[in-house]
Image: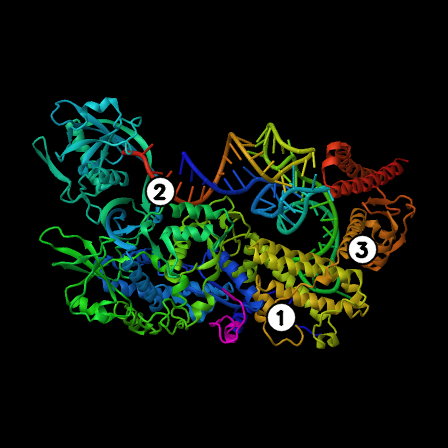
RNA sequence: GGGCGAUUAGCUCAGUUGGUUAGAGCGCAUGCAUGACACGCAUGAGGUCACAGGUUCGAAUCCUGUAUCGCCCACCA
């Protein structure tokens, strides 16, 4: 067959056109199960990358894993959907855009205003949101791009609104005043998990608090945050601490502000052995103190303005003098001033250097302040009456429901050790703060009213109320839920919140006309992420809930995208294949939910995975996925995490340019072991200066090998065989030993690849493919085949073609581009490989006898080559083989031509008692001795054989000792004992042969 | 502080339920312009499986402890 392929694989010229072919054939597009469709469903939702992000190695490895699974199942004939999309990533995106605007225009978000800022972020999203998805395409991801979702698009917004409404109505969402982590730079609450700790060299200051009514007596309190004393409302000692028993019930005066505060006793807060055993209590500015304040009903004095300055509360009169710190930065200027004033008053007892951890906001990199504010929470804990999931199941609470799903096996986490972290985290059942004081995100769908007049409070929960609004129809009243936000304080005024179901903008309008104001805050990004598996597939399905309206009118008012679109250069929003997919059709959720696998890194197992399980159960009544696969994290060669700031990261896009996408994928797959971290040595590319890794050469070289082997096979297929297509060679026909061997290896490989994919052992998949294709097929079978091809053997051609075709199929999930391209070069090929049927392993092809025999032939061949390498004179010289028994002699005889063609040396003799030729180099194998006469270097031979003998002796001694041990013979399984005996016998024969050869060298 | 994990060839990693001479790739050494491929071919060298105990007839594998490293969670005024 004539074949025109260049001698080196060029990924650049192949990848784009091949991807285009797939898109044109619409093979990635999956639809809801139709009538009589009996196919199994396989589905994955992508962990949506951040809209501001660029592809990094984490995406690349996770994308590769998901694509391997997706392509494998597609070829298996499953109805396969990989749902793509991107995340609006609230705080991260807003921070980036704000920063950019400030750098360019020196304007803050307050200068721009809410609408303008949000418009700018949408612009940003349109510009950068598509980038990462096209990068995912460049690694070959076979997502159903028609369905691409964005966590802020209408489809997702509807799900968010519906879930919020449902939880609000059920009392799972509530508003509360809590101490939150406050980012004073971005001026928003941030979650615990958005905080990193940095070790700071600070100081521990001991401050003297005068005891009220006891002149010259002081309580000494140590603190790393002296400025918080302005908000102290108690000092605490341990109840059993003898040193302070006489002070129980007394008061101290807070210096500088002059406030009289109680001395309380608290065994939880105070460790009497630490410091002076006295703790200042600042309920509004420290989590532990907050808890203490709640226990003792202490006043909470908030000292902070939202931008991190001291407010008017930070002032007072002390010893007749006025002090004020208002307007000063809390942890810096105010601290300095407080320390200076205390110093002047002689109230500083001691200052010591002290290393401690300070929480910083991950987004703004500025220190976090604990801050008392009103926030919305999802209650994770248990309810006395329990909660009801969407399938009617009763659970004690949301966290418990998600824990049960893992403990009872409905969700399986692989590797299973990660289940512990998941369960421990959920087990804390800490309420989830879901409100963020940002402008970019899903706005909280609650309208607040200051209300006068009676409301009927439901008996079960004080926040639940029934209230019919007169200006809403009865029907409309069903679409709102009411909670008391703040009970009446003076004059019976209470604050009430109305949540509105999605799809009723006219109700929202009526609420506003009647004095309601929508909460300005937005939801934590993870709230919409938690709904990702169901929102992308159309929950709440319009036909399933009569109460819910179809999606058309949803959120038109609150979504500024329509306005933003007008100002964009191309005005493309939902037409774009990346940012606005087709709406989910009815039945999509039924077909593909629960999804099959979720693949992710371990860092978001709690933040994201646990919450998806919770919301999936609560909203849809079933788990969101059956399997969670947690892949390893790639580090640099020194074991550090890769990051932009460290400059130690490898950019997958660079690797695609230099090595090709298949090389990237193969290498990543091969590295995807079950360990928690994998190291990738990073080096600078000499040409481009970009970071790269020699690891990727493995993939590139392998791709090149596949390319050239295919080139060779295809160019050596007779047209007749090519025309006949590639019928699998008939096994009944008498096949040569090596034919049976390679078919046996192929069958084993098919088995390994499938079972390893099913077990998420991606490294094994890559290794098995590599070993079969390179070692078995290319190094051995193909080399053997060359002589037979020259002799006009047609069997070997069809076996080669069969092996190639099957290999391309097996390789396709890992290396889709090159395999698809080569597939198109196969004879008479019009269909695409991407949808070709997955090969079945033929159990009849397994041939252990052939595998054993070929192993002997291989070692004989290698030993002859070794002699040839050692003594160049040995090349082409006749070889004498002295097999240990007749069976081996026969096997060799069968493969005589194979050995001869692989070594270029004729086999002069093959007999059990073949005599050693004079001056022969000898190699001793367990099954056979190999001689080539007339080439010897006595010293070298002696050294080589002596070393071999010593090694063997060690093993023989070990085996003898074991067999001499009565306990071993009595207790070990019979097969093990017999195996060891046989082996020992063989080893002893081998040993004798070596000794004999050595003796002959001496003479 | 609590939890999880790692330690096997110079490097990156495999090593199924404990069992028969511990494997692969890269790198290294030597040779090779072999009618697919030098991103290649052939051959070779290289390992007291971190350390110390224990269980067992038998341990890289199971248990305990030690050391080093990494990750997650929580943080003490």
Q: Which mark is residue A993?
A: none
Magenta part of the protein: which range? A22-42
The mark closer to the camera, 1 or 3, is 1
Earlier in the chain: of badge 1 and badge 3, it is 1
User: What mark, if any, has residue A197 been given in the picture?
Assistant: 2
Q: CA distance from mark 3 to mark 2?
A: 65 Å
SS under mark 2: strand
Q: Mark 3 = which residue?
A: A903
Q: Which residue is mark 1?
A: A823
Of the image marks 3 and 2, the number of the one nearer the N terminus: 2
Residue A952 figure quarter: top right
B67 over A863 or under it: above or below: above
Q: Residues within 10 Å of mark 2 (few under 14, many from 20)?
A: some
Residue A861 visible, this orientation:
yes
State whether residue A424 is above or below residue A132.
above
Whether residue A441 is visible? no
Q: Residue A18: horizontal and vertical position, in percent?
A: 55, 71
Mark 1 burial class by Cα count in 10 Å: few <14, some 14-19, many 20+: many
Q: Chain of mark 2?
A: A
Image mark 1: chain:
A
Queried whether the magenta region covers residue A548, the answer comes back as no
Density class for disc 3 (Cα within 10 Å; few <14, some 14-19, many ≥20) is many
Residue extending farthest to the left is A320
Image quadrant where one finds the C terminus of chain A: top right
Left or right, A884 with reference to A978: right
Task: Name the side, left or right, on which A3 lies relative to A677.
Answer: right
**Residue at image point 33% right, 49% down:** A381
Q: Nearer the viewer, residue A552 or A913?
A: A552
Q: Quick one: SS at disc 1? A: helix
Q: Which numbered disc flags the more N-terminal residue, 2 or 1?
A: 2
x and y percentages locating residue A595 in the rendered image: 47, 62
């Amino acid at each position: 067959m004539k074949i025109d392929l260049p001698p080196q694989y060029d990924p650049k010229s192949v990848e784009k056109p091949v991807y285009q072919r797939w898109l044109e054939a619409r093979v990635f597009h999956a639809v809801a199960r139709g009538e009589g469709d009996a196919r199994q469903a396989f589905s994955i939702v992508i962990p949506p990358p951040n809209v501001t992000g660029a592809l990094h190695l984490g995406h690349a490895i996770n994308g590769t894993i998901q694509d391997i699974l997706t392509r494998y199942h597609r070829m298996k004939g499953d109805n396969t959907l990989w749902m793509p999309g991107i995340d609006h990533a609230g705080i991260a995106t807003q921070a980036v855009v704000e920063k950019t605007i400030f750098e360019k225009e020196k304007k803050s978000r307050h200068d721009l205003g809410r609408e303008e800022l949000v418009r700018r972020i949408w612009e940003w999203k349109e510009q950068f949101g598509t980038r990462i998805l096209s990068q995912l395409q460049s690694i070959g991801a076979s997502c159903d791009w028609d369905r691409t979702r964005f966590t802020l698009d209408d489809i997702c917004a509807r799900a968010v609104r519906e879930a919020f409404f449902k939880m609000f109505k059920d009392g799972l969402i509530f508003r509360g005043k809590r101490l939150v982590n406050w980012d004073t730079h971005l001026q928003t609450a941030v979650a615990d998990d958005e905080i990193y700790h940095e070790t700071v060299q600070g100081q521990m200051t001991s401050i003297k608090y005068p005891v009220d009514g006891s002149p010259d007596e002081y309580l000494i309190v140590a603190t790393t945050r002296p400025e918080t004393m302005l908000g102290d409302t108690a000092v605490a000692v341990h109840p059993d601490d003898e040193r302070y028993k006489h002070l129980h019930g007394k008061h101290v005066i807070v210096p500088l502000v002059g406030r009289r505060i109680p001395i309380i006793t608290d065994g939880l807060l105070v460790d009497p052995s630490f410091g002076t055993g006295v703790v200042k209590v600042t309920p509004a500015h420290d989590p532990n103190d907050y808890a203490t304040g709640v226990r003792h009903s202490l006043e909470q004095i908030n000292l902070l303005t939202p931008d991190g300055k001291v407010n008017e509360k930070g002032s007072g009169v002390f010893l007749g003098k006025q002090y004020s710190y208002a307007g000063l930065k809390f942890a810096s200027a105010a601290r300095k001033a407080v320390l200076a004033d205390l110093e002047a008053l002689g109230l500083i007892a001691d200052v010591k250097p002290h290393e401690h951890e300070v929480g910083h906001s991950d987004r703004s990199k500025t220190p976090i302040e604990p801050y008392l504010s009103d926030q919305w929470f999802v209650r994770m804990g248990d309810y006395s009456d329990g909660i009801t999931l969407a399938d009617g199941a009763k659970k004690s609470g949301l966290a418990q429901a998600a824990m049960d799903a893992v403990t009872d096996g409905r969700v399986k986490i692989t590797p299973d050790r990660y289940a512990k972290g998941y369960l421990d985290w959920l087990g804390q059942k800490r309420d989830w703060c879901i409100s963020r004081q940002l402008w970019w995100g899903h706005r909280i769908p609650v309208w607040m009213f200051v209300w006068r007049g009676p409301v009927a409070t439901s008996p079960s929960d004080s926040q639940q109320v029934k209230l019919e609004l007169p200006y809403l129809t009865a029907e409309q009243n069903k679409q709102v839920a009411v909670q008391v936000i703040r009970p009446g304080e003076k004059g019976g005024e209470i604050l009430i919140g109305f949540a509105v179901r999605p799809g009723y903008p006219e109700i929202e309008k009526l609420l506003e006309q009647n004095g309601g104001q929508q909460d300005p805050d937005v939801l934590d990004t993870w709230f919409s992420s938690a709904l990702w598996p169901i929102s992308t597939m159309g929950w709440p399905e319009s036909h399933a809930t009569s109460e819910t309206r179809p999606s058309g009118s949803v959120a038109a008012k609150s979504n500024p995208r329509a306005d933003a679109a007008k100002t964009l250069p191309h005005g493309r929003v939902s037409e774009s294949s990346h940012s606005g997919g087709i709406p989910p059709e009815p039945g999509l959720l039924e077909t593909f939910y629960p999804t099959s696998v979720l693949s992710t890194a371990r860092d978001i197992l709690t933040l994201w995975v646990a919450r998806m399980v919770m919301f999936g159960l609560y909203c849809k009544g079933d788990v969101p996925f059956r399997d969670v696969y947690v892949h390893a994290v790639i580090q640099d060669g020194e074991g550090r995490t890769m990051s932009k700031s460290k400059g130690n990261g490898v950019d997958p896009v660079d690797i695609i340019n230099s090595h090709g996408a298949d090389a990237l994928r193969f290498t990543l797959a091969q590295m995807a072991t079950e360990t928690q971290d994998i190291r990738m040595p990073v080096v600078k590319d000499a040409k481009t200066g970009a970071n790269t890794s020699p690891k990727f050469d493995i993939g590139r070289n392998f791709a090149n090998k596949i390319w050239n082997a295919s080139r060779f096979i295809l160019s050596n297929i007779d047209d007749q065989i090519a025309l006949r297509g590639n019928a699998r060679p008939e096994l009944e026909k008498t096949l040569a030993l090596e034919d049976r061997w390679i078919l046996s290896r192929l069958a084993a490989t098919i088995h390994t690849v499938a079972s390893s994919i099913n077990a998420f052992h991606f490294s094994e998949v890559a290794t098995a493919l590599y070993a079969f294709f390179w070692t078995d097929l290319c190094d051995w079978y193909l080399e053997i085949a060359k002589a037979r091809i020259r002799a006009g053997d047609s069997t070997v051609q069809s076996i080669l073609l069969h092996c190639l075709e099957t290999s391309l199929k097996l390789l396709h999930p890992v290396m889709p581009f090159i395999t698809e391209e080569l597939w198109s070069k196969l004879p008479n090929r019009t269909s695409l490989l991407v949808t070709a049927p997955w090969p079945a392993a033929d159990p009849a092809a397994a041939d252990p006898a052939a595998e054993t025999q070929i192993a002997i032939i291989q070692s004989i061949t290698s030993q002859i080559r070794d002699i040839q390498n050692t003594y160049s004179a040995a090349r082409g010289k006749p070889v004498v083989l002295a097999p240990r028994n007749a069976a081996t002699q026969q096997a060799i005889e069968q493969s005589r031509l194979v050995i001869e063609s692989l070594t270029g040396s004729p086999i002069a003799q093959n007999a059990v008692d073949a005599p050693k030729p004079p001056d022969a180099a000898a190699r001793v194998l367990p099954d056979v001795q190999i001689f080539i006469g007339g080439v010897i270097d006595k010293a070298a031979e002696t050294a080589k054989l002596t070393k071999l003998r010593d090694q063997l002796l060690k093993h023989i001694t070990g085996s003898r000792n074991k067999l001499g041990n009565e306990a071993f013979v009595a207790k070990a399984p019979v097969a093990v004992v017999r195996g060891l005996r046989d082996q020992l016998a063989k080893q002893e024969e081998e040993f004798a042969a070596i000794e004999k050869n050595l003796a002959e060298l001496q003479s």
